[in-house]
Amino acid sequence: MAKGFVKGVKSELKKVVWPTKEQLIKNTTMVIILVVVFSVIILGFDMLLELGDTYLWNFIQQKVG
């Protein structure tokens, strides 16, 4: 059972097309850029929601007492 599994894994790994160094660098760079861009977008939404929350609580506090 285990020998058949290992043989199957080896045969599947022979079919894998590994990226070139240039492709790997390009793809890694793109992932890092996208992570930074989406992090900034999420930070912006978070700051807007926090600002809205602060204004809402201040408004409620003024009306209630």
Image (cartoon, rainbow, N blue to C red):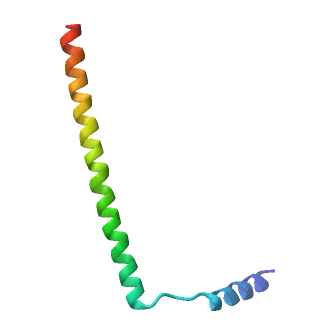
Quarter of the image with the N terminus in it: bottom right
Residue lying furthest right: 1
Q: How many marks?
A: 0
- Residue located 75% across and 81% down the image: 5
- Residue located 23% across and 8% down the image: 64
25 is higher (above) or lower (below) than 41:
below
Q: Position of residue 3 (x, y in %)?
A: 77, 86
Residue lying furthest top: 65
- Residue located 35% across and 73% down the image: 30
50 is higher (above) or lower (below) than 44:
above
19 left or right of 34 in image = right
Q: Position of residue 48 (x, y in %)?
A: 25, 39
20 left or right of 9 in image = left
57 is higher (above) or lower (below) than 50:
above
44 is higher (above) or lower (below) than 32:
above
Q: Position of residue 50 (x, y in %)?
A: 25, 36
Quarter of the image with the C terminus in it: top left
- Residue located 41% across and 86% down the image: 23
- Between 12 and 19, which is closer to the camera in this rendering? 19
Residue 31: name its quadrant: bottom left
56 left or right of 38 in image = left
Q: Position of residue 24 (x, y in %)?
A: 41, 84
